[in-house]
């Protein structure tokens, strides 16, 4: 199967301006050599702590940023450096859902206008009457009442606003949606409603998702495969079950062990990481994780470990992961 | 009596005077906190869990927020009758508080040292030099490396996890009997959250204090609490020991919540149980039980008359007519 999205050695370095003349001597290596792929109709989960570069990576993939190096191929086409005009047809196929629907929806537009706009920009959806018909259909798909058309975003609750954001993302029948923390701002009882909706839509429309989140339990629930990111690099990738049952990278293991389990009987022996995530402006030498790693060896501070295959579809960037 | 509670909250009612009329954010909340125990208050945004904490501390935004009913007593002393000055003594000495966002809880223009020694000087009457020695000890206790250097630094120079440690250090400086932690780890990453929760547990064991932990995360509750209060739309839906709540949830809201969270054990892409609908606004609450419009078990009785709290067994209490129906 040809992947829908193929990313190779992607880098996104932001210049850090400082000093009297704001000259740039250093770079924030937010994304630093990431390779991944997403197949049609598949969900790749992307997990990491704040500042690990997961949102920056997502924004590169929808080309809100132009990457510093590496390539992004969508359906075989190199989109890494496309100019804005050439990007426009691509936007039909790659859409994005944001964490905070209040900030990502135009507060001065009605829901009807918000949902119709992508069709107008792309010149799709036929006549005005047909577009309005499509808007009603979209509202129905995401479970909002038809009368929402003439209302404004502030009149809705957080969960309903996220439904509007989802309706806008699927308006043009995209093939890939980048979901950046789509349920983090929602209450528990609403979160499950939105997760069910995303899974249903994927089945119905054969959507591929890049699902970015910091909550491993949520990511595991929606993903076929999961990639774990630490300080700009992907440290482990595997299918969801393998990753949770049989993680290879020490960082993944400690992330899993840090999740509080909603079961008071479980005597949870935690492996608690010490220290904080270092800055991507001055990452540690060798393996970025070595200062916090419970099993680090001298070689870990000397060179960055190559990504090795530890099982079928299971890759880990750790000197100590057994090679298969 | 050794077992008399540190804190007793009885029928607490808190109202806010807003432009659109009076809103009752907390409506008849009761619970107790025993010495050395951790009580979790869990609920979704707007359920009144933070307002309950602010009511106990008498830190409600003034003049809008007012406690209009019920009683709060700390070690048998009624907090409502205390003057502003007396309450200030209580806040520093007997109850410590940790907030969600450490950056807003700390003063950005004062050094860590100044903020940490302030309480020690006021409440413990220490001299400047004594307070500094004590502050260094406390920072060490909360796991901050090279505390002498940190004392001269400002909040922005620390990471989020370190800032939260400083806030905890300030809250614990005078050795309070009760620590109220309002979403202390919500703004932190999961590996840092684990560090902070572990720190609170260790300090609690060492100092023998009681903790009220307010959170929306049922995982955090299960791992840290002895007793749980489940709140919904300003009222207590259910309360009991952590085992009562997780093993034998009696309220349909608690049951729905526990079933709706994805865990590492749920089958990927399976349909999660949901609680249909959403939390009612505090301005248009249902006439009967507040959960009635989302409850799969609701009857005419539920729609007409709000339920009162019933005792199930031991400490387990529920506000639901249908708790015995399956």
Image (cartoon, coloured by chain):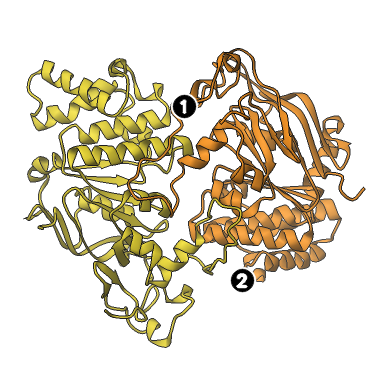
Q: Gap in Å between the C-alphas at discs 2 and 1?
A: 45 Å
Q: Name the one closer to the observer, B121 or B292.
A: B292
Q: Residue at 9% x, 41% y: name it.
A: A89
| B6 horizontally vs B217: left or right | right
Looking at the image, which residue is at 82% across and 51% down? B122
Does dot 2 land on a helix, a strand or a loop?
loop
* Apparent colour of chain B: orange
**x then y, percent, for residue A207:** 20, 43
Residue B17 located left or right of residue A207: right
Residue A89 in sight from this viewpoint: yes
Pinpoint residue A78: horizontal percent, then vertical percent: 8, 56
Q: In this view, does B147 lie above or below A200?
A: below
- Asked whether B288 or B44 is in front, the reply is B288
Q: Position of residue A176 (x, y in %)?
A: 19, 45
Discs 2, 1: same chain? yes
Residue for badge 2 = B145
Q: Please tell me whether residue A156 is drawn above or below residue A272 in the rendered image.
A: above
Q: Mark 1 lies on which chain?
A: B
> Can you say whether B167 is above or below A271 in the image?
above
Chain A display color: yellow
Which mark is drawn over residue A114?
none
Would residue A17 be visible to someone looking at this image?
no
Q: Where is residue B142 in the image (x, y as percent from the top left)?
A: 66, 64
Res A131 quadrant in image: top left
* Residue occupying image coordinates x 25% and y 42%: A96
Where is mark 1, residue-wise?
B278
**N-terminal of the two: label 2 or label 1?**
2
Disc 2 and disc 1 in contact, CB within 8 angstroms: no
Q: With A29 as the anchor, is A259 left or right in this view? A: right
């Amino acid at each position: 199967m040809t992947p829908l999205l193929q990313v190779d050695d992607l880098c996104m370095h932001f210049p850090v301006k400082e000093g009297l003349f704001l000259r740039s001597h250093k770079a924030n290596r937010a994304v630093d050599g990431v390779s991944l792929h997403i197949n049609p109709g598949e969900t790749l989960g992307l997990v990491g702590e704040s500042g690990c570069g997961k949102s920056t990576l997502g924004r590169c993939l929808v080309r809100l940023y132009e990457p510093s190096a590496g390539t992004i191929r969508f359906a075989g086409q190199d989109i890494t450096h496309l100019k804005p005009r050439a990007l426009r047809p691509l936007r039909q196929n790659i859409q994005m859902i944001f964490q905070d629907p209040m900030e990502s929806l135009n507060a001065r537009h009605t829901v009807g206008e918000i949902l119709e706009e992508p069709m107008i920009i792309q010149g799709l959806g036929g006549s005005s009457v047909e577009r309005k018909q499509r808007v009603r259909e979209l509202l129905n798909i995401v479970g909002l009442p038809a009368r929402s058309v003439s209302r404004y975003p502030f009149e809705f609750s957080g969960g309903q606003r996220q439904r509007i954001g989802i309706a806008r993302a699927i308006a043009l029948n995209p093939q890939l949606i980048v979901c950046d923390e789509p349920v983090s701002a929602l209450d528990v009882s609403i979160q499950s409603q939105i997760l069910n909706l995303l899974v249903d839509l994927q089945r119905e429309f054969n959507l591929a998702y890049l699902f970015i989140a910091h909550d491993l339990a949520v990511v595991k629930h929606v993903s076929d495969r999961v990639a774990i990111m630490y300080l700009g690099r992907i440290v482990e990738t595997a299918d969801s079950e393998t990753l949770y049952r049989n993680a290879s990278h020490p960082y993944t293991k400690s992330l899993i062990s840090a999740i509080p389990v909603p079961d008071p009987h479980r005597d949870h022996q935690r492996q608690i990481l010490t220290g904080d995530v270092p800055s991507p402006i001055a990452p540690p030498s060798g393996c970025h994780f070595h200062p916090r790693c419970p099993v680090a060896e001298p070689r870990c501070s000397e060179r960055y470990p190559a990504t090795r295959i530890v099982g079928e579809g299971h890759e880990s960037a750790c000197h100590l992961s057994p090679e298969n | 009596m050794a077992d008399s509670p540190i804190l007793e909250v009885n029928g607490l009612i808190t109202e806010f005077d807003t432009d659109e009329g009076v809103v009752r954010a907390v409506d008849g909340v009761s619970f107790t906190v025993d010495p050395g125990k951790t009580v979790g208050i869990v609920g979704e945004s707007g359920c009144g869990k933070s307002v309950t904490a602010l009511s106990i501390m008498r830190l409600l935004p003034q003049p809008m927020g007012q406690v209009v009913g019920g009683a709060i007593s700390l070690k048998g002393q009624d907090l409502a009758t205390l003057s502003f000055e007396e309450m200030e003594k209580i806040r520093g000495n007997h109850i410590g508080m940790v907030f969600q966002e450490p950056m807003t809880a700390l003063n950005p223009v004062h050094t860590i040292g100044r903020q940490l020694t302030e309480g020690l000087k006021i409440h413990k009457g220490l001299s400047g030099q004594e307070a500094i020695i004590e502050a260094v000890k406390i920072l060490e206790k909360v796991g901050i490396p090279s505390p002498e250097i940190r004392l001269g630094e400002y909040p922005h120079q620390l990471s989020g996890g370190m800032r939260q440690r400083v806030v905890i250090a300030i809250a614990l400086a005078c050795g309070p009997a009760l620590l109220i932690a309002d979403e202390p780890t919500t703004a932190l990453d999961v590996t840092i959250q684990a560090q902070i929760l572990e720190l609170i547990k260790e300090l609690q064991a060492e100092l023998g204090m009681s903790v009220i932990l307010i959170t929306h995360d049922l995982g955090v509750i299960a791992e840290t609490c002895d007793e749980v209060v489940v709140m919904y739309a300003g009222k207590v839906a259910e309360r009991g020991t952590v085992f009562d709540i997780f093993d034998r949830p009696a309220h349909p809201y608690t049951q729905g919540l526990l079933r709706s969270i994805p865990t590492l054990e749920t089958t990927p892409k399976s349909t999660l149980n949901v609680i249909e609908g959403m939390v009612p606004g505090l301005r248009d609450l249902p006439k009967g039980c507040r959960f009635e419009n989302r409850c799969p078990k609701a009857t005419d009785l539920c729609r007409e008359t709000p339920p009162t709290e019933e005792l199930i067994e031991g400490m387990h209490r529920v506000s639901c007519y249908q708790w015995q129906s399956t």
